[in-house]
Amino acid sequence: MNVLVINCGSSSLKYQLIDSLKEEVLAKGLCERIGIEGSQIVYQKAGGEKETTVAPMPTHTEAIGMVLDALQNEKTGVIKSLDEIGAVGHRIVHGGEKFAESTVITDEVIEAIKECNELAPLHNPANLIGIDACREHMPGTPMVAVFDTAFHQTMPEKAYLYGLPYEYYEKYGVRRYGFHGTSHNYVSHRMAEFLGKNIEDMKIIVCHLGNGASVSAVMNGKCVDTSMGLTPLEGLIMGTRSGDIDPAIVEFIAKKENLDIDGVMDVLNKKSGVAGMSGISSDFRDLEAAEEEGNEAAIRTLRAYEYRVAKYIGAYTAAMNGVDAIAFTAGVGENGPVTRTGVCSYLGYLGVKIDEEANQRRGADNLISTKDSKVAVCVIPTNEELAIARETLRLVR
Ligand code: ADP
């Protein structure tokens, strides 16, 4: 069965058409600048060249229409009719406490997702627009919602409660939810499989280091803690997000810089992280190049980044009373041997030993620790789209 995977943002839409039985991507791409002048669709058939077409897309409905047209295009398309799309899987950012698992989309589910909008005001409404647009074009096709938060719903109370008045949790749902759940779930399971072990008997730490970054502790196949919180701002230092800071800094900066709360939040979300610390870039390729030239700002930024990841690994080792395996994934985790070495340099006390030759290898699943390392350290490429396609297939079958 072919599954169309949709990841809808406020002005963008990423898509992949996946043959979910063969687990092959047939075509993929994205629509950009939806609702803004100069909107365009990028389409790439498996093994083909990327094609970019500029076309007006006032709303997501036109964008989905363009995607479906591209998939059925006589020359470069991969299907003859929409009947060849068996189901649609939607990435939904926030499922609150309502969704501990993926679910088939019904009117009731849509209402329940809307009730989570307050927790992710930038993301959830856009995800819902994507569902509406797909329903317009493919009214009879089953659809599934896969939530970024769902995998983390197994966290115990002690991990998800903040040191705040309990009534904020009761009245407003203020607690740790965690994000990137689809990736943490996929990578932890893949890691166990790769090592030939049963995830039920394992203590795993997954470091998802992309533009957004988070760490999770997965014990016996269940998430017991994760570094992102009520929102994706908490935890690691990220591309442009601050991660953990003293909450009193919000007031301090507001007064010093004469900013209101939105202004400070903008700084914490978009102008901080490695981009703000270095003044160079949010992209690790630029930072690593600057480090090679001896750039002081790049050096101190990268060291602070690695140190923060290592601190979370220490914390989660304590949370699980041990760790058997550590996985690195996402853009930086998969492509940044220097960052991986930097993080692991703090883990000698756990008996972690890195095989530098293996660490330099790129590509597929890869064991980067030595044979006598007490903890297996691996690079496991994440694949959120495939995970969404699998969930979709499981639920609509
Ligand atoms: P997201 O999905 O959160 O947007 P990704 O997981 O794609 O992010 O990660 C993007 C980041 O990965 C880039 O900003 C860059 O810092 C890093 N990255 C990508 N390729 C490389 C590379 N070859 N070397 C080092 N870092 C890389």
Image: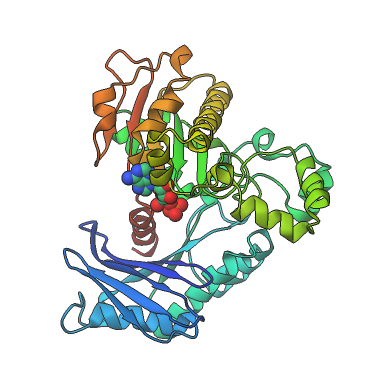
Rendering coords of residue 84 (x, y %) = 25, 76
Give me the residue at 51% from left, 37% from top: 215
Taking the image as shown, residue 372 lies to the left or right of residue 98, namely: left
Q: Is residue 388 visible?
A: yes
Rendering coords of residue 251 (x, y %) = 81, 47
- Quadrant that contains the N terminus: bottom left
Q: How many labels sit on residues? A: 0
Rendering coords of residue 38 (x, y %) = 43, 81
- Quadrant that contains the C terminus: bottom left
Rendering coords of residue 6 (x, y %) = 41, 67
Taking the image as shown, residue 228 lies to the left or right of residue 336, namely: right
Foreground pick, 42 / 202: 42
Taking the image as shown, residue 175 lies to the left or right of residue 339, namely: right
Foreground pick, 338 / 316: 338
Looking at the image, residue 107 lies above or below residue 159: below
Looking at the image, residue 317 lies above or below residue 246: above
Q: Quadrant of residue 292?
A: top left
Q: Quadrant of residue 111?
A: bottom right
Q: Is residue 186 visible?
A: no
Give me the residue at 43% from left, 20% from top: 345
Give me the residue at 42% from left, 40% from top: 290
Looking at the image, residue 241 lies above or below residue 94: above
Foreground pick, 361 / 138: 361
Q: Quadrant of residue 154?
A: top right
Give me the residue at 27% from left, 37% from top: 365
How has the structure been colored for display? rainbow
Taking the image as shown, residue 128 lies to the left or right of residue 209, namely: right
Looking at the image, residue 294 lies above or below residue 249: above
